[in-house]
Image (cartoon, rainbow, N blue to C red):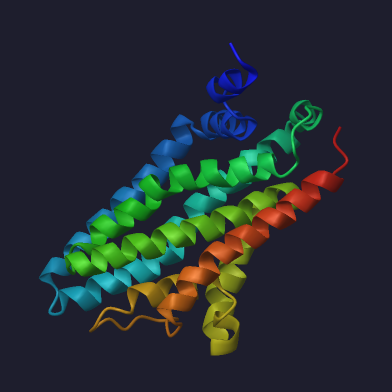
Amino acid sequence: MSASAAAVRRPSTLAALYYVLLRSQVSIPRLLGIGALGALAVLLGSFSIWADDPVEAASHVVAVYGLGILVPLAALWLGTAAIGDLVEDRLLVYLWLKPVPRWQLPAAAVLATVTLVIPLAALPTAVGALGGNSELALRTFLAASLAALAYSGLFVAAGLWFRRAVWWGLAFLLLWENVGANASDGTARFTVTSWARSIVSAQDGVDIPLDGRSVTASLIVLPAIAIAAWILATLRYQRADID
């Protein structure tokens, strides 16, 4: 067998790391916890059918609960654990010693986190938005998926930069993504939730808090946040003292 044929059949290091981290993130408590929050998103969204303005009611459920609570909490729980658990358990050294490009582990962690957050959090949020209409549901799925990508990058990076990253992440969500975002339009521009909500509010008749960004800009900014966070995570991983 030629070397090129063997290379094709052999899984890439990135794919192998992705598979390992994905398996490590999947646990019964996490699936049940996030699944329950996702079911609540569907339930809350279904109530909007009986509202005087179903689109407005459903869009507020999306903004306040889906994009404000469900998606960021799911990304926090899974993202900080992706590499953070390896750090806490002192198992990261076994991966660090392998001759693997340093950028691959953070990239695999972000991809693994997004793989779980989209079906567990973004999809239920979009299903709940069907209480408004199908266009709202499609915009919601796009916004929630991009928000999941951005939050996953941030919280994977946090898992490398901070001890007990989940608590730092909770403080970030409470103080910045909520309190800080509502303080002024200037601070809102630097929050993930504002950019995500702007995609939802682009539909006619939808007016939700913390929107007002350009949809085109939102489609660029949210992936850019994930890329920037991945770069920061890679830099930290390259310079980390692994024991």
* Quadrant position of residue 55: bottom left
Residue 65 is situated, as x and y percent measured from the top left of the image, at: 38, 64
Asked if residue 22 is positioned above or below residue 201 in the image, the reply reads above
Asked if residue 162 can be seen in this view, the reply is no
Residue 115 is situated, as x and y percent measured from the top left of the image, at: 46, 43
In the picture, which quadrant includes the N terminus? top right
In the orientation shown, which residue stands out farthest toward the top?
A: 1
In the picture, which quadrant includes the C terminus? top right
**172 with respect to 32 (left or right):** right
Asked if residue 208 is positioned above or below residue 23 in the image, the reply reads below
Is 147 or 86 nearer to us in this picture?
147
Query: Residue at horizontal 43%, vertical 85%?
Result: 212
Is 183 or 97 nearer to us in this picture?
97
Query: Residue at horizontal 59%, vertical 59%?
Result: 226
* Quadrant position of residue 35: top left
Residue 152 is situated, as x and y percent measured from the top left of the image, at: 56, 53
**137 with respect to 194 (left or right):** left
Asked if residue 213 can be seen in this view, the reply is yes
Is 82 or 222 nearer to us in this picture?
222
* Quadrant position of residue 133: bottom left
Asked if residue 109 is positioned above or below residue 130 in the image, the reply reads above
Query: Residue at horizontal 32%, vertical 79%?
Result: 202
Query: Residue at horizontal 42%, vertical 42%?
Result: 33
Asked if residue 170 is positioned above or below residue 212 in the image, the reply reads above
Is 24 or 112 nearer to us in this picture?
112
Residue 156 is situated, as x and y percent measured from the top left of the image, at: 64, 49
